[in-house]
Amino acid sequence: MADNIKTKTEAKTKKQRIITDVALIILLAVIAGGAYFFWLFSRNAGAYAVVYIDGEEVARYPLDTNIEVTFSTYDGRSFNTLVIRDGKADVTDAGCPDRICVNMRSISFEGETITCLPNKLVVKIEGGESPGVDLP
């Protein structure tokens, strides 16, 4: 009889652990979903696509215009083609061997970037406010 009571207690404890684990998984899923939606709806739309080559700003284009421009590397051996259309910036062609920058999705929110490491090119979305010091 003592073994029977011990078995029931172990079964109850195992059942409680399963319920606790399921509740914890559901709680974590709800928290992750809430964080995702907070991030999704708190992003700011950008105003400019800023192009940096080797860390130096070389161009700044408003996202509200449609344009296609090609940037060559300093040595002239490679290139990147930037297309801005419908408020989004996208690298559509590149002369680099891996073409990871071409396979990245288009960007339109502040802080998003497209990077081409072989060509040392970075396209970054920035806001509409001009950088600088505010004067009183």
Image: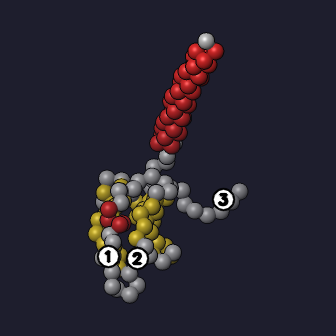
Instruction: Using the image, tell me which numbered label, if any, was put on residue 134.
Output: 3
Q: Do the residues labelled 2 and 1 touch (CB within 8 Å)?
A: yes
- Identify the element where label 3 is drawn: loop
Instruction: Using the image, tell me which numbered label, if any, was put on residue 97.
Output: 1
Q: Residues within 10 Å of mark 3 (few under 14, many from 20)?
A: few
Q: Name the residue located 49 percent from the left edge and 40 percent from the top edge.
A: 36
> Sequence order check: which comes first, mark 3 or mark 2?
2
- Residue sticking out furthest to the bottom: 75
- Residue sticking out furthest to the right: 136
Does residue 87 appear anywhere in the picture?
A: yes
**Nearest to viewer (mark 3 / mark 2):** 2
Disc 2 target residue? 118
**Nearest to viewer (mark 3 / mark 1):** 1
- Identify the element where label 2 is drawn: loop
Residue 40 drawn above or below residue 17: below
Q: Check disc 1 and give the amino acid type.
A: Pro
Residue 23 drawn above or below residue 135: above
Instruction: Using the image, tell me which numbered label, if any, was put on residue 35.
Output: none
Q: Do the residues labelled 3 and 2 touch (CB within 8 Å)?
A: no
Q: Residues within 10 Å of mark 2 (few under 14, many from 20)?
A: some
Does residue 9 appear anywhere in the picture?
A: no
